[in-house]
Amino acid sequence: MIKEKVEGILEKIRLSLQAEGGDVELVDVSPEGVVKVKLKGACAGCPMSQLTLKMGIERMLKREVPGIKEVVAV
């Protein structure tokens, strides 16, 4: 159930990333609440990708999905 909620939130975020030439793909959600994502397109090589990951994706997921502790790029 948590994985489906995470995917739903990522769908909303994905629209903004795609507008800038990037994308995000959900890889896994661990039982400990660690979300693993793969940044794609322009996001993969962008120097601001860590800011997008932590201040954008992670912040939104923590706010919307109880139990999420961290988001990491793989």
Image: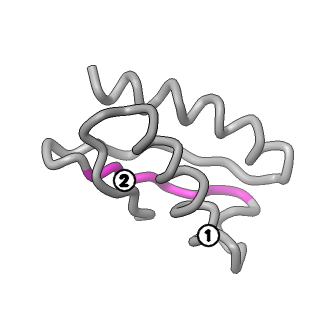
Q: Residue 38 lies in magenta, yes or no?
A: yes
Find disc 1 in the rendering and name its residue: 51
**Residue 65, numbered circle:** none
Q: Nearer the viewer, mark 1 or mark 2?
A: 1
- In the image: residue 14, left or right of residue 55: right
Find disc 2 in the rendering and name its residue: 36
Nearest the viewer among 41 and 72 is: 72
Q: For numbered disc 2, what is the local secondary structure?
A: strand
Disc 2 crowd, CA 10 A, few/some/many (<14, 14-19, 20+): some
Q: Where is residue 12 in the image (x, y as percent from the top left)?
A: 65, 30
Q: For numbered disc 1, what is the local secondary structure?
A: helix
Residue drawn at (85%, 44%) of the image: 19
Q: In this view, does 5 lie above or below 55?
A: above
- Give the mark, 1 or 2, whose residue is nearer the N terminus: 2
Quote the CA–CA distance across marks 1 and 2.
16 Å
Q: Which residue lies furthest to the front in this view?
A: 63
* Coloring basis for residues: one colour
Q: Is residue 45 above or below residue 30?
A: below
Q: Which residue lies furthest to the bottom in this view?
A: 47
State the image quarter where residue 64 is shown.
top left
Disc 1 crowd, CA 10 A, few/some/many (<14, 14-19, 20+): few
Q: In this view, does 42 lie above or below 13?
A: below
Residue drawn at (36%, 53%) of the image: 36
Residue drawn at (30%, 44%) of the image: 68
Q: In this view, does 6 lie above or below 16?
A: above
Image quadrant holding the N terminus, namely: top left
Q: Position of residue 43 (x, y in %)?
A: 69, 62
Q: Which amino acid does label 2 sit on?
A: Lys
Q: What residue type is labelled 1?
A: Leu
Nearest the viewer among 44 and 8 is: 8
Q: Where is residue 40 in the image (x, y as percent from the top left)?
A: 63, 56
Q: What is the span of residues highlighted in magenta in the rendered image?
A: 34-41
